[in-house]
Image (cartoon, rainbow, N blue to C red):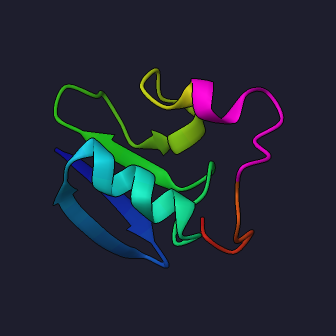
Amino acid sequence: MWYALVHSEQLGPMPRKELLDLNRQGVIGPMTMVWREGMARWMPLADTPEFEALFGESHTLAVNPDAT
């Protein structure tokens, strides 16, 4: 289960699919801080091994640049 920080509010727990849906809707973006059990710290969504392939090096999939 995943957690995300959006405008200083913690969302979650949620499954991976819901996190992907939030990204598609522009609620979160590649720089949104996320965490799940087993991670040492919160990190940007695009830097997690599970999601980095979605964004590539340029992090261009962010629909809403304020969704961090």
Image-based side of 36 in relation to 4, left or right = left
**Residue 59 drawn in magenta:** yes
Q: Residue at x 30, y 48 (%)?
A: 17
- In terms of secondary structure, what is the magenta stretch mainly? loop
Image-based side of 64 in relation to 13, left or right = right
Image-based side of 60 in relation to 25, left or right = right
**Quarter of the rendering occupied by the C terminus:** bottom right
Q: Is residue 19 placed above or below 58 in the rendered structure?
A: below
**Residue 19 drawn in magenta:** no
Q: Which residues are magenta?
A: 53-61
**Quarter of the rendering occupied by the N terminus:** top left
In x, y percent, where is residue 37?
16, 34
Q: Residue at x 40, y 48 (%)?
A: 34
Q: Residue at x 80, y 46 (%)?
A: 60
In x, y percent, where is residue 28?
53, 64
Nearer to us in this view, 51 or 41? 51
Q: Is residue 68 placed above or below 57 in the rendered structure?
A: below
In x, y percent, where is residue 62?
70, 57
Image-based side of 47 in relation to 6, left or right = right
Nearer to us in this view, 40 or 60? 60
Q: Is residue 45 placed above or below 4 in the rendered structure?
A: above
